[in-house]
Image (spheres, rainbow, N blue to C red):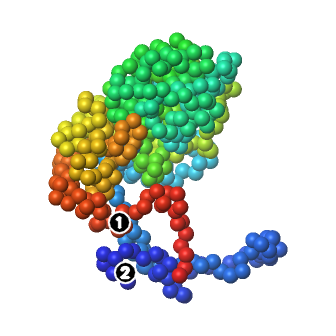
């Protein structure tokens, strides 16, 4: 039996020979061929695998105790900037668990899955209304997957026009971190240009706006948490050069219901449904990154897609799969994306409605600005202006106390808060990026600010104590560089 407050033992350490939590029935199918005759000798085990032998009750208790060691949105706040780790309403999970959705076989004929197809169709129409795009594909399984689909669409557009010289994609320094990788995977040369608190450096963009420009990838609001006020002029420069403007929807949470990417001049966009529409975040569960386009690019979307058919004399519309046309980039994923994530996003949109989604973005911006002002006396913002849904605090203000951004983040863990994003984006030294999201209450935001103030007061008395944090977590401060570069991923007996 584990000792209270002691580290949870490995399941191998709970093992006792002969214990089992499951009795399998005897195999009633004779072997057609002996295993030794099917496999090469080198592939055969010389001894049984060293698996743990644990009873059912011990297994249940072991994994329940482990689950309590995890920080979770149901127990505490995640102020992670750029990630939008907000609460997922339980009604979304309840609807996704309905047997008609959760039990639906992916190869069910469309004639027997009209409800699911109707949901996908309605979700696509809602995303078009919210972004101004003409059409969406719901296939991409996450944000970066949606980025890749968007870049492949851009490549297909230029290729089919015979404009094969357009091989460069411009990415500002304040863009989302995965943009350069997605463009490179699509075969483009990536060119970085500077950006500042006001947005893209237009002179640097003009210098790149020639016949080789394929697209500009832009995150708005940008990754520094500020609105790209030069978006309209940026679009004019890119389009005048014959390029496409790509919208990274990672930060749509700040403007949903208030501004639409298509109205700003964007031609392609992806949306992180697992951020804006409150489904599980991609790094902690399945994601969804639908990609949308304007009318001239609709033929390049991945297929198949759901189409609605209204027939005279029939009381209800019918929905069916429609194969992609010859200009499509092809299928991005088997079957049709992460369907239950799409169900959750649909539930979130329908629950709020248009007016409610406008409130979502308003509360996200309000909470971020409120937290920024609460932290200002001790952690001034790196960009001293009204932020959107997130902001960067200048961690260099901690130096007189003998602290770094890392020290503050570790100490927050002892006070029940997940750390904010640190050292990102790279345009700010010792960056601390906070995003409280719209789902957090005023009391929680004030408690986070009070925790920061408490840590700094402790550091003024004893900086070494703060630098030793965390002390109340299952594992103390680890060598994160070594853990990332030389991780130990297997149990070794003895």
Q: Secondary structure at mark 2?
A: loop
Picture coordinates of residue 390 (x, y %)? 31, 38
Question: How would you rate the neighbour count of disc 2 (Cα within 10 Å): few for under 14, some for 14-19, many for 20 or more?
Answer: few
Q: Of the numbered discs in the image, which one, if any, rests on residue 476?
A: 1
Look at 68% across and 81% down and name the residue there: 47
Nearer to us in this view, 357 or 309: 357
Residue 23: x %, y % from top left: 56, 80
Up/down of 114 relative to 453, above or below: above
Q: Is residue 407 above or below residue 478?
A: above
Q: Is residue 302 above or below residue 71?
A: above
Disc assigned to residue 406: none
Q: Local crowd at mark 1 within 10 Å, few (<14), some, or many (≥20)?
A: few
Callout 1: helix, strand or loop?
loop
Q: Position of residue 374 (x, y in %)?
A: 18, 42
Q: How many marks?
A: 2
Residue sitting at x 46%, y 57%? 481
Determine the CA span between mark 1 and mark 2: 19 Å
The image shows residue 283 at horizontal and vertical percentages of: 46, 50
Residue pictured at 79% horizontal, 70% vertical = 39
Whether residue 155 is visible here, answered yes or no, is yes
Residue pointed to by mark 2: 2
Which quadrant of the figure has residue 458?
Answer: bottom left
């Amino acid at each position: 039996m584990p000792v209270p407050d002691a580290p949870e033992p490995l399941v191998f350490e709970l093992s006792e020979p002969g214990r089992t939590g499951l009795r399998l029935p005897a195999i009633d199918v004779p072997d057609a061929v002996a295993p030794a005759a099917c496999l090469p000798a080198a592939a055969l085990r010389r001894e049984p695998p060293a698996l743990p032998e644990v009873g059912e009750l011990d297994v249940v208790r072991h994994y329940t105790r482990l689950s309590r060691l995890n920080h979770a949105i149901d127990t505490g706040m995640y102020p992670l900037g750029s990630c939008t780790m907000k609460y997922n309403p339980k009604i979304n999970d309840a609807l996704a668990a309905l047997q008609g959705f959760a039990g639906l076989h992916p190869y069910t004929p469309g004639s027997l899955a009209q409800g699911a197809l109707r949901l996908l169709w309605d979700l696509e129409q809602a995303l078009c209304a919210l972004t101004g795009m003409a059409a969406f594909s719901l296939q991409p399984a996450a944000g970066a997957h949606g980025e890749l689909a968007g870049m492949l669409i851009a490549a297909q557009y230029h290729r089919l026009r015979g404009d094969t010289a357009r091989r460069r994609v411009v990415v500002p320094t304040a863009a989302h971190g995965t943009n350069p990788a997605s463009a490179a995977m699509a075969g483009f040369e990536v060119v970085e240009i500077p950006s500042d608190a006001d947005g893209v450096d237009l002179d640097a963009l003009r210098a790149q706006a020639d016949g080789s420009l394929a697209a500009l990838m832009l995150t708005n609001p940008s990754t520094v948490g500020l609105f790209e006020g030069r978006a309209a002029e940026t679009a004019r420069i890119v389009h005048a050069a014959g390029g496409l403007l790509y919208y990274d929807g990672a930060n749509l949470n700040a403007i949903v219901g208030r501004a639409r990417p298509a109205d700003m001049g964007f031609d392609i966009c992806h949306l992180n449904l697992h951020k804006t529409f409150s489904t599980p975040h991609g790094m902690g569960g399945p994601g969804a990154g639908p990609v949308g386009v304007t009318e001239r690019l609709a033929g390049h979307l991945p297929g198949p897609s759901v189409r609605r058919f209204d027939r005279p004399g029939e009381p209800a519309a019918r929905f069916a799969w429609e194969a992609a046309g010859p200009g499509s980039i092809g299928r991005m994923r088997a079957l049709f994306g992460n369907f239950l994530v799409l169900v959750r996003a649909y539930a979130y949109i329908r629950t709020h409605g248009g007016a409610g989604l406008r409130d979502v973005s308003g509360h996200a911006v309000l909470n971020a600005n409120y937290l920024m002002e609460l932290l200002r006396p001790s952690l001034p913002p790196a960009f001293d202006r009204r932020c959107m849904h997130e902001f960067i605090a200048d961690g260099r203000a901690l130096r007189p106390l003998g602290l770094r951004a890392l020290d503050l983040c570790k100490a927050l863990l002892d006070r029940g808060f997940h750390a904010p994003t640190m050292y990102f984006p790279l345009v700010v030294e010792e960056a601390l990026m906070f995003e409280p999201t719209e789902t957090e209450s005023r009391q929680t935001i004030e408690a986070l600010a009070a925790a920061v103030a408490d840590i700094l007061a402790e550091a003024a008395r004893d900086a070494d104590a703060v630098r030793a944090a965390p002390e109340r977590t299952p594992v103390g401060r680890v060598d994160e560089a070594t853990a990332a570069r030389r991780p130990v991923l297997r149990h070794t007996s003895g």
